[in-house]
Image: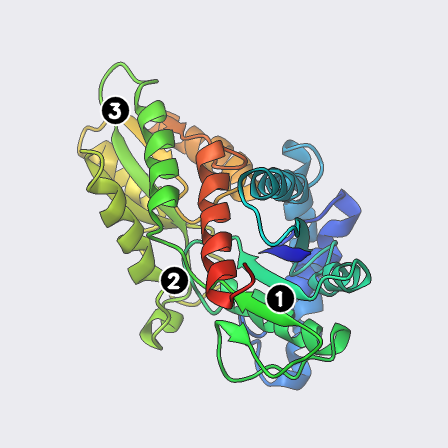
Amino acid sequence: MIGVILLNLGGPDSLEAVKPFLYNLFSDRDIIKLGPLFIQKPIASLIANLRAKKTQDAYNLIGGKSPLVEVTNAQAKALEDLLNSKFEIRNSKFKTYVGMRYWHPYIEDALKKMYADGIRQIIAFPLYPHYSVTTSGSSIREFKRALTRVYKCNGDKKEEYCINCPPVSVRIIKSWFDHPLYIDALVEKIQRGISDFKERPVVLFSAHSLPKSFIDEGDPYANEIRGTIEAVTKKIDIDWRLSYQSKTGPVKWLEPTTEQMLHKLAQEGIKDVLVVPISFVSDHIETLYEIDMLYKDRAQKLGINLKRIESLNVSPKFIEAIADMVMTNVKKAGWV
């Protein structure tokens, strides 16, 4: 049996879970280095305490918890069904799992279940189309650390796969920003979103922001975002802009912010805007609260009719894209 583990950020499953979730998030030095190593966790605890109430209020507006685990579980189920119905692999089957970085179900817990289920061939698939050390990179590093604990796998220096580890064979899919079926899935959602307007809207690609220092140090995230947009605009003729959302803290982040872009569009006399949350493939707080509530309210005050495309979630074309990437790696590994 081949196991596929979907890696994602995770999110609080109750209002009580918000504070420990924030603590886990800010304890990760792959995201932000809060001074020397020995003070990282104390500062993370302070930040979690300071932000807990405001963050709980936001989650309360979208149902009192993050929908990310439910959505990711649904994606895993849809993927497993498609793989097992469409592909034959030496009389074997696929089984999918979900591993989250900062809240339950944790990556290590998912790997323990995989080990108990007899899985010895693993495809790791981060649900981030665009590679960044802060997202895919952090999840992959935690996956490898957990792999050594659960499977006693020593790993190697290659990012794509693990060799010389008799207990397990692993392939890791790092980045897929321009995969043709992923682009088709996005184009499908954009075309559907455009059809909801009487006049053709400006398409605003809103990506999760990143401290500019990461880009200056060579992180490919911003280039891959633009790579996705380039692939989309080859398939559909749109007037588009790019902005960044969800910045936190005093350091310099990628710009323009989505709020800044909305003001600029209003100054240009733009009345209709379709937001494409370009770096997100699932509904969670950044789409349901930040875009659908905060930015929509801001746009309305600026005289802009703002709508958002449906998130990819479990759209058939998106699940087909993941399945295609999984099978490509299964074949490369020689498991067929």
Q: Which mark is residue 253?
A: 2
Question: Residue 315 location in percent, x, y?
Answer: 49, 33
Q: Is tag 1's residue or tag 3's residue first in the polypeptide sequence? A: 1
Q: Which mark is residue 271?
A: 3
What element does badge 3 sit on? loop
In the picture of the structure, the residue carrying the numbered disc 1 is: 26
Q: Quadrant of residue 64?
A: top right
Question: Residue 26 location in percent, x, y?
Answer: 62, 66
Q: Specify whether residue 28 is in view.
A: no
Question: Residue 145 location in percent, x, y?
Answer: 66, 76
The amino acid type, in three-letter code, at marker 1 is: Phe
Question: Residue 298 location in percent, x, y?
Answer: 40, 33
Q: Quadrant of residue 201?
A: top left
Residue at point 36%, 67% (across, down): 212
Cα–Cα span, label 1 and label 3 = 38 Å
The amino acid type, in three-letter code, at marker 3 is: Lys
